[in-house]
Image: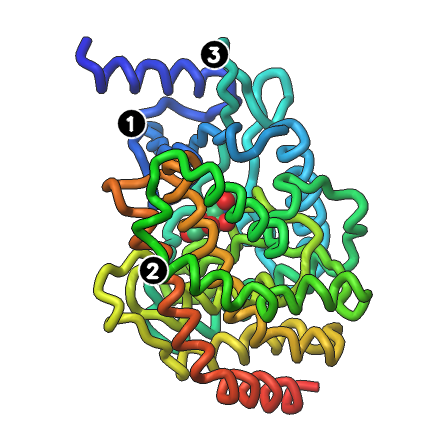
Amino acid sequence: MNENTNAEANLREVLSHFIIEGSISSVRLYGSGHIHDTYAVTNGTPDSPDYLLQRINHNVFKNVPLLMENIELVTRHLRQKLENLPGARPDEEVLTLVPTHAQQSFYQDAEGNFWRVYLLLDGTRSYDIVETPQQAHEGGKAFGKFLALLADLDTNQLHDSIPDFHNVESRLRLFEAALQRNPKDRARQVPQEIAFVQQRAEQMSTICRLGREGRLPLRTTHNDTKFNNVLLDKYDKALCVIDLDTVMPGYVAYDFGDAIRTTVNKAAEDEKDLSKINVDFHLFKAFTEGFLQETCSFLTQEEIVSLPLGATLLPYIMGLRFLTDYIDGDHYYKIHFPEHNLQRARAQFRLVEVLEANMDLLRNTVQETATLCK
Ligand code: A2G
């Protein structure tokens, strides 16, 4: 047996613990995620579904059973809400977990790895780079509707799958600690990036502060609203929000900001040529309209004001996390070449600068859109 056949045999063994219909014809690596190992499982039996198999990264998600409880809770809640919504298609609009024969939502193998299986949604696609305002608008609607459907889920029922995930003050402390440790002696290669982080530390803590003062409510938020976490159908209509691992209590500006980070910039998240990093304002407006269409009935005025702050905060946090991982020796994110995390950090910081330079435009667009839909 060669290495690939061996690996596929192991994956098929894992799959045998789940209630799978039909017979599997292939299992292949899938997607562009930075955290888990994901495989597309193709069914050889006509009319039987394809699946998505994931090995959950338990260095990142330290308590997988609690993580899976969150996902069960959230998918159940979304499904119930959609079942009562005229015209909704719950089977296509919510992820479906496939249980194991022991009726669990995950399987732990002898080596301690955790696995789960979802139904693969047929005929859908996601975009790493947004191409049209229609796609941006649909993405805005999808993430907005996600928040709206979960607005009545008691946040106390959710576990923090990664504590302090978007808490920038905590991220800054981890960054300073990595600088102190400096295990690979990389800190001296990046003085400009370090200065970039430190100059903005205070201003970027605004949302944290407003939250602490009780001026921004904690809601059930997605917290990883990269545009490619929305599946669109063949007509580019948004269908389903995926990657529910970080659904936790958070601020709406986090979801808005992370989605803007990955919607308005037509260059890659790790673009090397910083001159290519720009903000497409048509996409910003289209996303904002879709998002507020679904959420403005329940967002407070302070939350609406916080949205443009989220748009600069999230690329800042991502740049900070990429840079921290680079300094620390690349333990968190999967990298594809030695300076990948540094390149990602630089691209994110450039995006922060472009967004900062256009803050008035972002604010006006958000405010005007909110006024129109109130
Ligand atoms: O990469 C992953 O999806 C991260 N998820 C997310 O937070 C963000 O950093 C993203 C960047 O592309 C987790 O860390 C769980």
Q: Residue 111 carries which label?
A: 3
Q: Mark 1 points at which residue?
A: 26
Give the mark nearest the N terminus, 1 or 3: 1
What secondary structure is found at the residue carrying circle 1? strand
Of the residues under marks 2 and 3, which one precedes in the sequence? 3
Evaluate whether residue 128 shows in this view: no
| Label 1 CB-ligand 1 distance < 8 A | no
The residue located at (55%, 31%) in the rendering is: 98
Residue found 60% across the figure and 53% down from its top: 166
Q: Nearer the viewer, mark 2 or mark 3?
A: 2
Asked if the residues shown at circle 2 and circle 1 are in contact, with their CB atoms under 8 angstroms apart, the answer is no
Q: Residue 173: x, y in percent?
A: 59, 48
Q: In which quarter of the image is the N terminus?
A: top left
Q: What amino acid is found at the position of numbered circle 3 in the picture?
A: Glu
The residue depicted at 63 percent of the width and 91 percent of the height is 372
Left or right placement of residue 257 versus residue 132 in this view: right
Find residue 49 and report its image quarter: top left
Q: On the image, numbered disc 2 is attached to which residue?
A: 346
Q: In which quarter of the image is residue 221?
A: bottom right
Q: Position of residue 72 (x, y in %)?
A: 66, 38
Task: Give the residue drawn at x 73%, y 58%.
Answer: 219
Nearer-the-camera pick, 137 or 269: 269
Residue at the far left in the pictured view: 2
Tell me the SS state at disc 2. Answer: helix
Kindly identify the amino acid type of the residue bearing the numbered disc 2. Arg
- Residue 245, image x, y percentages: 57, 42
